[in-house]
Amino acid sequence: TSGGNESTSKSPPPPPPPTSTASSATSSAPPPPTTPEEDSISHAAATVSSCPNPGPLEAATWDVRRLTSLDTYDGLRVDISKQLSPYFAVVHSFHLGTTMLPDGRTSSYGMTVQMNDEEGFSMARVDPERGTVDGRVHKALLGGVAMGKLQLGLSQEGSSDQLLGELDVGAQTWTANFKYGSMGGGNMFGMNYFQAVTPKLAMGGEGMYIGANGNMLSSYTAKYSFMPGGSPGDLELGEGSSGANGQAGAVGEAFPSYLAATFNAGQGMLSFNYKRAITPSRVNVGASLECSPMTLESQLLVGAEFSLTRSKMNICVDGTGRIQSTLEAKLGREQGSPTLNFAAELDHGKNVMKFGYGLNIGS
């Protein structure tokens, strides 16, 4: 009896109930293997659109305007800036011996106060002689997804007061701007949109309504960016035009040269803007052509910029023979060293000559 009980206690347990082969295979199958290329950062970047953000529509031709619209003046201009804290600065501006002021004055003084932080900045400019105050506030919203802007202009007369609010939004391949405010004694509102169609081509448009005169304004812009050694016919990304991960970088860095066309439907004007980087960060040239297809009136501007170690020179010539030039020279190697400026404008057709010099002191 003891032997039988011993054999019974050592008998194997009953087998488990049968399970389906499909469910067993599914639960026990390991995940599919991945290659190092699929786990790399470059593979993740390749799944993102290669079209870069084109930037704001207002800045689409800013480089050309900077080269062809120089800030020339006459007399003496002095700017004294003081950094009171890492976030707060004050600038005192003097303009002496000038004939450019609209009210016939020969001198002016203005004070600018600016405060910066991680989410934006606030700025106010006061002209005590004219009794005007201009203010501007930029603030990041929604964690940096949008940017809110407020522009304010006040005067003693009150007829030219203006208030304008703007909202900038954007994503990886587009930007948009909405604006609303009062200007010229009436309300105004507008919006614009700028979309990157390909890594080199961006297109957009803007519409605006001005209540003071009831005008509806609209314009359309197309911008094509390319490398200095390439040509507008090159439709593919060339060498050196992409980042380390094979994705196109910012338009201004990857494509330092571009051609832009803008049609202003309200004025019936067609403009072409061309900027070329001969030597990046050293020599840049730009040209602007504005023409009216109906009246065939046109205006041509050509400008160039030469940046050296401690100096920078700009020159601009228009179709009437007017010549503008500015020269900026640093007087030291340390940060915050004074800057000496010279400006000249010669218009032989109108027999107008203006010469001026300036000094910027402070950080």
Image: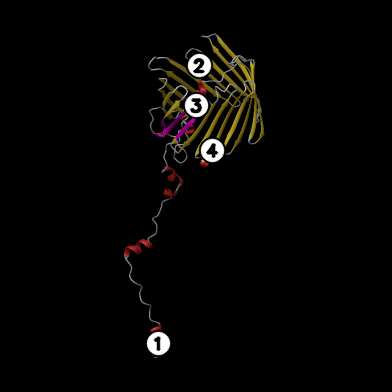
Contact (Cβ within 8 Å) of mark 2 with mark 4: no
Residue under circle 3? 62
Residue 241 percent location from the top left of the image = 45, 34
Q: Measuring 49% from the left and 26% from the top, which residue is drawn there?
A: 62
Residue under circle 1? 5
Dot 1 or dot 2: first in sequence order is 1
Q: Work out whether 49 lies above or below 349.
A: below
Q: Which secondary structure class fits the magenta region best?
A: strand
11, 296: nearer the viewer: 296
Contact (Cβ within 8 Å) of mark 3 with mark 2: no
Dot 4 or dot 1: first in sequence order is 1
Q: Measuring 43% from the left and 29% from the top, which residue is drawn there?
A: 225
Dot 2 or dot 4: first in sequence order is 4
The magenta-colored residue range is 175-204
Of the 4 image quadrants, the one containing the N terminus is bottom left
For residue 162, side relative to residue 200 (left or right): right
Q: Nearer the viewer, mark 3 or mark 1?
A: 3
